[in-house]
Image: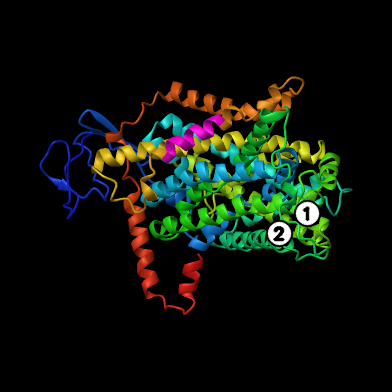
Amino acid sequence: MTIMESVSSSENHDIVVNGGDQNRDYYSKPELVTAVGTTPATPDDEMVESGTTTMHMYSELSSRDQMQYGKTKRGLSSRHMQLITIGSSIGTGMFLGIGSALARSGPLSVFLGFTFFSAFVLFPLMMCAAELCSWLPIRGSIFQFADRYVDPALGFASGYVYWYGALMLVCSDFTGTVSVIQFWDDKTNPGYYVLLTLGISILLNLVAVRWYGEIEFVTASFKILLMLGLICATFITMLGGNPNHDRYGFRYWKTPMKEYLEQGALGRFLGFWRVLIYAGFACGGPDVIMMCSGEVQNPRKVIPAATRKIYFRLGLFYIVGTLALGVICDASSQELVDALTSGSSGAAVSPWVIGLRSHGVNGLANFVNAIVLTSAWSCGNAYVYSATRTLYAMSINNKAPKIFRKCSKAGVPVYALGVVGLISCITFLNSSNSTSTVLNWFINLSTVSFLITYMIILYTYICFRRAMIAQTGDLSVLPFRTPFHLQPYAAWFAICFCFIIMLFNGFYVFWPGAFNAADFISSYFGIAFFIVTYAFWKIFKRPSFVKPAAADIYSGKQEIDDEEAEFIAEQEKRPKKFWDPVVDFIF
C-alpha cells in the first residue's frame, strides 16, 4: 500500500510528505488510498507503508460492526467527568484505611507521603493524560495510545494490567463497603452484603452513561462535602471551637514520624516509605480521566479544563486533608490502636471520628459511616465502569473476543459488564476470611498494577511527544500543554518515582521474621502478570516498536472532530440560562 499525497493546505503549518512538494494541514488525518490491485486493509488495523517505515492506522468500529454490536455514546459532561474522577479517587482509603498509616507512621509521615505522591506522580500524570486525550479522546485510550505510539505488545499488556487492577479495586472498594456496613451489623454473613452492593452497581451500570454520570455526581458530591466538613471541623476545633474549649493546635505532632520495623532514622524513613506505598493506592484520577475521554462531550474543551480543576481539588483533599487528620487525631491514641488491633469496622476505626470524639464532639459516628458507605460504594461503582469500558475497548481493537463489543441500545457494553460482574465475585472471599485481611490483599494487588499503568501512561506520553515533533515539527498544535515547560522532565521523574515505589512495594515481607507468602504474592503478582502478558503478545504476534515518524497520531480524529463540531453547533442553538456562568466556573 502507498500513501497518496492527497493533501490540503494550512495557513500556519506545512510539512512535506514522502519528499514531495505538496503541503498538508497536519492537524487533520491524511487520506489513505490503497494501490490498484491490492487488498484494502481492515478498518480495525490498517498497515500503511510510507517510504521505509510502516504506519499502523487504527479506527473506531466500522459502520457494519456498529450496526451489529452497537457503540458507546458521548453522554458525559464536564461536571460528570470531574465528579466521577474525584469520586473514584476519594474512597475508604481517605476515611478509614488511612488510620492504620497514621498509627504506624505518624502525622508528618502521612502528610509528606501524600504530598510527595501528589506533587511528583499525580501532577505529571494528570498533565500527560490531558495532553494525550485532548488531542485524541478515543475509547480505551490507555492501551490504545501505548499501542499506537510505543509498541503493540505494550498496548496489549497495559490493557490487561489496567483491567486487572480495576477489577482488584472493585473488589477492594466493595470489601470496604461491607466493612462499613458491619459497623451497624456484624452478625450477618458479609456475603449477603457483597451480593447486594455489587448487584446494585451492575444494575446501575446498565443504564445510559448520562444517567450513570448523574448517579456518580450525586454520590461523589456527598463525599466531597464530607471531606470539606471534616477539614473545616479540624481547624475550628483546634482553635478551641469544641465542647471542651481546648485549643490543642499541633499537640499531637510531638512525635511527627514514628519508627517502623527499625529504630532511629532508618525506622522513621521506613514508616514514611510505607505511607508512600499506601498513597499509591489511595491517590488516583488520571486513569479515570482517560477512560472517560471516549464518552465525554466536547472533549477538547472539557478535558483540559476539567483536568486542571480535578488536580487542584484532589491536591486540596490529599494534602490539606492529611494535614488536618494529623492535627485532629493522635497517632498514639489508644482508641485508634485498639480499633485497629481488634479489626473494628466502619466509623469505629475512622481516625476522623476518633479524633472528633476525643475533643468532645460525639454523635457523628453514624452520620460519617453513612457518608463513607456511599463513598466506598461509589469508588467500586466507578471502577466497574472503567473495567467494563477497558474490556470493550480491547475488543474493538482486536485484543479481546468480539463478543465484548456488543452494546445495548443505551450504549452499554453488556457482555463486558457481565464478565466484570462475574470476576468481581471473588469479593465473596469476605465470607471465609476477615474483612481486613482480604482488603489488604486487594490493596496490594491493585497498587502494583496501577503503578505499572502509571509508568506506561507516562512513557507513552513521552513517545507521543516525540511522534508529534517528528511529524508536525512542533507541539503548538496541541489543544493543551503542560504549564511551565515541565515536560518531558516531569514525566521521566515520575516514571523513576513510580518504579522505585513498585520495586519496594513489599519491602516489609523481607524483614527478618516478617515473611508472609500471601503478602509477598499480592505485593508482586502485578509485575509477573505484566511480564507474562507483554511476552505473550511479543512472542506470538512479533510486533515491532513504533518509530516516531510512523506513529499513528491521526486515525479516529476526524470522527471526533465531526462529533465535536456537531455538539458545539447544538450548544449554540440552546438558550442560555443565567446560571450557566456559575456552573462553568465551578465545573
> Along the horizontal axis of the image, is 236 left or right of 216?
right
The image shows residue 492 at horizontal and vertical percentages of 43, 35
Count residues near mark 2 (Cα–Cα under 10 Å), then give few for <14, some for 14-19, many for 20+: many
Say whether residue 419 is visible: no
Which of the pair 382/239 is nearer the observer? 239
Number of dots carrying numbers: 2
> Along the horizontal axis of the image, is 264 left or right of 542?
right
- What's the magenta region? 490-500
> Along the horizontal axis of the image, is 497 left or right of 478?
right
Amino acid type of the residue tagged 1 in the rendering: Gly
Which of the pair 69/22 is nearer the observer? 22
**Quarter occupied by residue 540:** top left
Eyeballing the image, is 214 above or below 466? below
The image shows residue 556 at horizontal and vertical percentages of 35, 48
The image shows residue 260 at horizontal and vertical percentages of 72, 32
Residue carrying label 2: 234
Eyeballing the image, is 337 above or below 536? below
Residue carrying label 1: 355
Whether the residues at callouts 1 and 2 have beta carbons within 8 Å, the answer is: yes
- Residue beneath the point at 51% across and 41% down: 121
**Residue at the extreme left of the image, as rendered:** 21
SS label for mark 1: helix
Label whose residue precedes the other's in the sequence (1 or 2): 2
Amino acid type of the residue tagged 2 in the rendering: Thr
**Quarter occupied by residue 303:** bottom left
Which of the pair 537/478 is nearer the observer? 478
Q: Quick one: quadrant of the N terminus?
A: top left
Eyeballing the image, is 414 above or below 542? below
